[in-house]
Image (tube, helix red, strand yellow):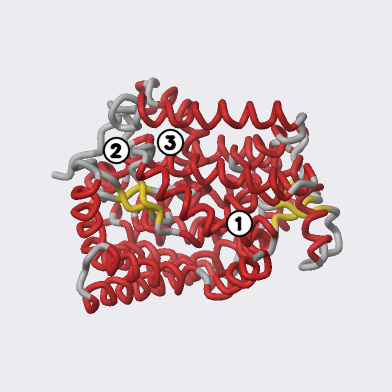
Amino acid sequence: MESILASIGQLLNNLGSLIVLPIVIALLGLILGMKFTHAVRSGLTLAIAFIGINLTVGLLGEKMSTIGSAFAENTGTGLDVIDIGWPAASALAFNTAVGNAIIPLGIVLNIILILLGLTQTLDVDIWNFWHQAFIGAIVAYVTGSFGLGLVAAAINVVMALFLADWSAPLIQRYFKLPGISFPHLQSAGYMLLAVPFAWLLNKVPFLRNMHLDPDTLRKRLGILGEPIFLGFFIGVILAAFAREAIADIILTGVNVAAVMMLIPRMVAILMEGLTPVAEAARKFMAKRTQGRSFNIGLDSAVLIGSPAVIASGLLMVPVEIGMALLLAPLGNRTLPFIDLADGVFVTAMLAPLVAGDVLLTVILGAIVMGIGMIFTTLLAPAVTDMIVTAGTLEVPAGYSLYTVMSDAAIPHSYIFYYVFQNPVVIALLISAVLLVGQYFLAKKFPLGEKLLADVAVPEKK
């Protein structure tokens, strides 16, 4: 059985989300009663959209990694813990015993919770279960127990669903995505940590009244406030601070402007493929669950077409490096590197908390990643030992440890890392309390209805 799960996990990791998710969507469409050709069309449309998104995000990531490296070299950080990035971390997570079991376990748990009425989210983004697998692998490493690692991963699968339910009203309203929610543990984890800080920022009249969201900037600046011009200016400024050559500065500006224009169009294509499946799912479940509403759970990549998300995500490159340097006296040793290109996934679910205000989104990003970097440093010995044991990577010269910015920086990773260093009974009790607490939060204080309900989406005129 274990070898079968390992083979399935390896296959899914080799295929990647670009192939796995469209297949899942097509199969889901067939299960929900769609015609074969319509289900396949939805799956293929989704694949095409993700190809476009991956190409544009890849272009953005390549430029941001180059700029980030230049920033780090120019500032002479002296930080000795290097970020290996999510691609290496996802491969590592899926290649563990917990990772081999996480996808079938996650699907079964999701179905049970839907049938029991404990979640409104049907998560079809199974490839991103690697985030839960990573946490489970960390716990298995700390405790030496595969069983406890699997329990921790399962708890986080459920927590991600509760976070998706909790955030759905605000996310759907801001991004205009009815019937969609986001159990993406990375972005949702940042959002969970950011909410109390967003509540405070929204209480400061001066900050709240600046309205530095893309729509308002467009009104104030005219054509210069359009996304492509904002992208060009941000790209030029970042490249200039990274001391690139004049030609490279202009090329970076054009590349970022291209991303600002292309990603929203790719997301529109994605929604064209997804909308029929979401509608079929709502009808299917309405007949079987006494009319109870529910949402399709997707990757937060769907959200990065927002100009506010892209602009604030780009600005996270210098902000993360600056935070790493500022926090060095407080114990940070992490040098942001590969996951500097992940800024849009940091800001994806933060922007709606402050009505898309770019400055406030970046402030929230700085707070959550600043806190996260302290913990990426603390988790680095465990991550390094896992990598060395797996024999997948070698620590490059000049650095003493590995860490993963994308996942070691989310609250669920470091909370469970420390919780499971307690005796088993205490660890399980604390985990149960956290799980019930997130369920209570989702049911009693949904975002956009009872919590941060007064955060208005700027009206277009």
- In the image, residue 435 above or below residue 91: above
Label 1 vs label 2, nearer the camera: 2
Q: Which residue is mark 3?
A: 360
Q: Which residue is mark 2?
A: 169
Question: Camera-side residue: 128 or 254?
Answer: 128
Helix, strand, or loop for circle 1? helix
Helix, strand, or loop for circle 3? helix
Q: Residues within 10 Å of mark 3 (few under 14, many from 20)?
A: many
Q: Which residue is mark 1?
A: 339
- In the image, residue 229 above or below residue 114: below
The three-letter code of the residue at mark 2 reads Pro
Query: Does residue 459 appear left or right of residue 200 in this picture?
Result: left
- Residue in view at x 71 percent, y 48 percent: 138
Residue 320, numbered label: none
- In the image, residue 181 above or below residue 394: above
Whole-number angstrom distance, CA of label 1 to CA of label 2: 29 Å
Work out which quarter of the rendered image holds the C terminus and state it.
top left
